[in-house]
Image: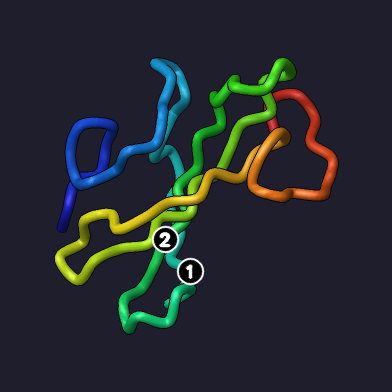
Amino acid sequence: MQKISAAIGGFTGQLGRFDGFGSSVASLGDLDNDGIVDIAVGAPGDDSSLDSTGAVWLLFLNDDGTVKGHQKISAEGGEFGGTLDEND
């Protein structure tokens, strides 16, 4: 087990106080082909866009469970081409 937060576990993404980071977590398999399973972490309260549509963070992990890298996907970033409604 490895705790991942704004202060622990190597995560360097910018989080807001009420983002809800970690309210949902899913295993994604090995996205970056390094032999280590990566995860998706929900942040439904992310309001970095003007319409509070939330975000999901893809976390690429090291073998000790710490974060090697990350990619935020939201209405305004991460090359998401779909449409999100408020509070999605």
Residue drawn where x is 54% and y is 24% of the image:
45
Residue 42 vs residue 21: left or right? right
**Mark 2 surroundings within 10 Å by alpha-carbon count, few (fewer than 14), some (14 through 19), many (20 or more):** many
Q: Nearer the viewer, residue 72 or 54?
A: 72
Left or right of 30 in this view: 47: right
Marks 2 and 1, Cα distance to the nearest angstrom? 5 Å
Q: Amino acid at mark 2?
A: Ile
Amino acid bearing label 1: Leu
38 vs 71, nearest the viewer: 71
The image position of residue 38, as x and y in percent, is: 39, 66
Tell me whether circle 2 and circle 1 mark residues in contact (CB < 8 Å).
Answer: yes
Q: Which mark is residue 39?
A: 2
Q: Nearer the viewer, residue 17 or 72?
A: 72
Q: Residue at x 41, y 26 (%)?
A: 15
Q: Secondary structure at mark 2?
A: strand
The residue where tag 1 is placed is 28
Q: Residue at x 59, y 22 (%)?
A: 48
Instruction: Indicate the position of residue 40 as horizontal and vertical percent values.
Output: 47, 55
16 in relation to 5, above or below: above
Q: Position of residue 43 (x, y in %)?
A: 50, 35
Image point (54%, 44%), residue name: 72
Q: Quadrant of residue 67?
A: bottom left
